[in-house]
């Protein structure tokens, strides 16, 4: 889905209010805005046009940083995409042969990701030309590893451990036993309205059978080992927000079907899998979140870096991809923020 939308370009200009009908809300935008409006501005506005040959800093820098990926995120995406490709590849297989074929194809697809990552990391031209940034590959040098070779060695080791745990679990058989015709592949972006707001649904790998929507997600959580032990709280609408949005979309497309999310977590403690049945996200939650972003986008005079203060707690910035850019971009005058209250920044 295009990330740069016409309303964003309009809202970034003085005197050009955001057309409400063109706003698109997503869980990712919600979390970024809630965590750090300044990072939200860098990603959604400052990066505009950064792909052009004529683009200069800071736009080009913001655009480059926008697509750099952290190790856990990259491995999760590589695993889900590889599993999707493997399921498509084994469509002709039936019976017990599907299980072995699935694992073999899964491993082959992951290896292809690793080969591409190795080649792209070895040729670091993407660091000076944002147009060469791969939108799905790993380019984020966090300082944790001394070289691309060391980084890739660690990723290979973690995937090796993952497949060892995978083959010793019931997951390959469980997934292979799903009727091939039940899968809705490849995953696609979707949009649908909630309370008059257009909502973006990220691609999900899911199957439809027995009046059930069974979706699968793979998450490497080495940077946040406790993620696998977190469980939903009925009062916490932010927990599993992408799943709640997916459930809301399913409720429109598949009325009266139950939604199951099969979550696979890989952490230093091993692999954990579980099934959750998400509630649908409430319209009030989406509307409140969207309203805050729309009001910010429509600030008089257009948006610029000096309207967005840095976080007071700098420890929360350690994993931010915009950290380097944030330190060089202007900040609001002392005691001045977007809403005039530094505590609400």
Image: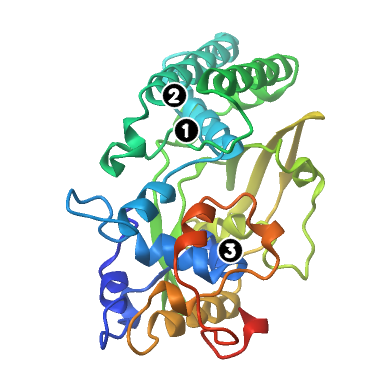
Query: 63 or 21: nearer the eye?
Result: 63
* Sooner in the amino-acid sequence: mark 2 or mark 3: 3
The residues bearing labels 3 and 1 have C-alpha atoms spaced at a distance of 22 Å
Coordinates of residue 115 in the picture (x, y in percent): 43, 16
Give the number of callouts.
Answer: 3
On-image quarter of the C terminus: bottom right
Coordinates of residue 178 in the picture (x, y in percent): 57, 28
Q: Residue, x 50% and y 38% (percent of image)?
A: 140
Q: Residue, x 35% and y 24% (percent of image)?
A: 123
> Which residue is denoted by mark 3 in the rendering?
31
Q: Give the structural element (helix, strand or loop) at label 3.
A: helix
> Which residue is denoted by mark 2 in the rendering?
117
Residue 113 seen in render: yes
Q: Residue, x 54% and y 29% (percent of image)?
A: 79
The vertical placement of 309 against 225, above or below, is below
Query: 176 or 31: nearer the eye?
Result: 31
Left-right relation of 206 to 136: right
Left-right relation of 223 to 69: right
The residues bearing labels 1 and 2 have C-alpha atoms spaced at a distance of 6 Å
* Sooner in the amino-acid sequence: mark 3 or mark 1: 3
Circle on res. 138: 1
Coordinates of residue 127 in the picture (x, y in percent): 36, 38
Query: 19 or 305: nearer the eye?
Result: 305
Q: Give the structural element (helix, strand or loop) at label 2.
A: helix
Q: Give the structural element (helix, strand or loop) at label 1.
A: loop
The residues bearing labels 2 and 3 have C-alpha atoms spaced at a distance of 28 Å
């Amino acid at each position: 889905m295009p990330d740069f939308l016409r309303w964003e370009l309009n809202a970034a200009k003085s005197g050009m209010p955001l057309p409400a009908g063109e706003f698109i809300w997503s869980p990712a935008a919600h979390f970024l805005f809630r965590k750090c409006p300044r990072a939200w501005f860098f990603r959604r506005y400052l990066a505009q046009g950064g792909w052009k040959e004529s683009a200069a800093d800071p736009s080009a820098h913001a655009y480059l940083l926008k697509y750099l990926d952290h190790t856990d995120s990259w491995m999760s995406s590589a695993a889900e995409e590889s599993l999707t490709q493997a399921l498509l590849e084994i469509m002709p297989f039936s019976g017990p042969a599907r299980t072995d074929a699935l694992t073999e194809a899964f491993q082959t697809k992951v290896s292809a990701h690793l080969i591409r990552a190795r080649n792209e990391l070895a040729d670091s031209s993407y660091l000076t030309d944002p147009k060469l940034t791969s939108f799905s590959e790993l380019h984020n040098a966090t300082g944790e590893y001394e070289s691309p070779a060391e980084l890739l060695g660690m990723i290979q080791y973690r995937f090796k451990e993952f497949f060892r745990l995978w083959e010793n679990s019931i997951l390959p058989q469980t997934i292979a036993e799903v009727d091939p015709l039940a899968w809705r592949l490849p995953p696609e972006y979707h949009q649908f309205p909630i309370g008059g707001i257009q909502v973006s649904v990220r691609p999900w790998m899911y199957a439809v059978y027995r009046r059930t929507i069974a979706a699968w997600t793979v998450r490497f959580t080495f940077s946040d080992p406790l993620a696998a032990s977190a469980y939903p709280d009925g009062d916490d609408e932010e927990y599993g927000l992408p799943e709640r949005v997916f459930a809301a979309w399913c409720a429109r497309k598949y009325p009266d079907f139950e939604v199951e999310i099969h979550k696979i977590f890989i952490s230093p403690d091993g692999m954990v899998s579980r099934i959750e049945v998400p509630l649908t996200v409430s319209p009030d939650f989406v509307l409140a979140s969207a309203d805050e972003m729309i009001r910010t986008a429509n600030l008089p005079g257009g948006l610029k870096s000096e309207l967005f203060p840095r976080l007071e707690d700098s420890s929360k910035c350690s994993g931010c991809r915009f950290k380097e850019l944030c330190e060089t971009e202007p900040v609001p005058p002392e005691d001045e923020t977007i809403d005039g209250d530094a505590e609400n920044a």
